[in-house]
Amino acid sequence: MSQSSKKMKAKERREYILSLLKQKGSPITGSSLAAEMNVTRQVIVGDVSLLKAKNEPIVATSQGYMYMRDVKEDLAYQRTIVCQHKGDDTEEELNILVDHGVHVLDVVVEHPIYGDLTARLRISNRRDVKKFIEKVYSTQASFLLELTGGIHTHTIAADSREALDEAEAALEEAGILMGK
């Protein structure tokens, strides 16, 4: 049921946002939430910030807002890998990982002033990769790796160690994995 037919109070709107995010299980854009509730995207950004301040595990990904479930419950194996490549090779890197059944949870770069900068990705298939790459180019954003000469880490997760091992081997063969 769309909420756009009536104006919601702020508290009701935040409860509704939380309910939608919990139910959906996949990202919802701030723009689509704003359209549904007949408010600006900035109002949604504020609502989500207030929900986060109340310790709701909501994260902003490149695909939209998500209510975070514990990934450890979903995928038995996790590890951190270190990669180095140019921005143009990001799509290849991500496709190698998802083609091996690996979920790319985040990307981290070490900034000389701010320390570790982490972006949650939650990429698990080629469709996610395509959306991520399209969004980077359509917004003319930069890849975080551009801040560090291409060096970055990813937290990756899968149902088996073998999937992680095979993905790492494929990244190494492509010249993307650092220092195995």
Image (cartoon, rainbow, N blue to C red):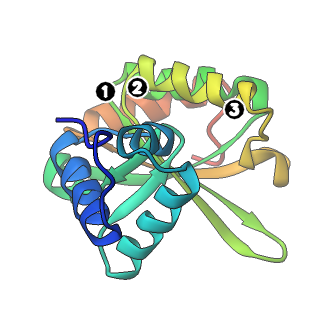
Q: Secondary structure at mark 1?
A: loop
Mark 3 surroundings within 10 Å by alpha-carbon count, few (fewer than 14), some (14 through 19), many (20 or more): few
User: Looking at the image, is mark 3 or mark 2 nearer the viewer?
Assistant: 3
Amino acid under disc 2: Val
For residue 19, what is the image quadrant? bottom left
Among numbered discs 3 and 1, the one appearing first in the sequence: 1
Q: 20 and 140: which one is in front?
A: 20
Local packing at callout 2 (Cα closer than 10 Å; few below 14, some 14-19, many 20+) is: many
Which label sits on residue 116?
A: none
Q: Closest to the observer: 19 or 79?
A: 19
Which of the labelled discs sits on residue 98, or is there none? 2
- Cβ atoms under marks 2 and 1 closer than 8 Å: yes
Q: Which residue was labeled with disc 1?
A: 101
Q: Given the image, on which type of amino acid does mark 3 rest?
A: Val
145 horizontally vs 11: left or right: right
For label 1, count other residues whose C-alpha is less than 10 Å away and answer few (under 14), some (14-19) or many (20+).
Answer: some
Towards the viewer: 4 or 134: 4
Is 66 displayed left or right of 119 in the figure? left
165 versus 180 height, above or below: above
Q: CA distance from mark 2 to mark 1?
A: 5 Å
Residue 88 rendering spot, x and y as whole percentages: 77, 24
Q: Nearer the viewer, mark 3 or mark 1?
A: 3
Q: Which residue is mark 3?
A: 136
Instruction: Tell me the CA gap for discs 3 and 2.
Output: 18 Å
Q: Position of residue 104 (x, y in %)?
A: 43, 41
- Secondary structure type for disc 2: helix
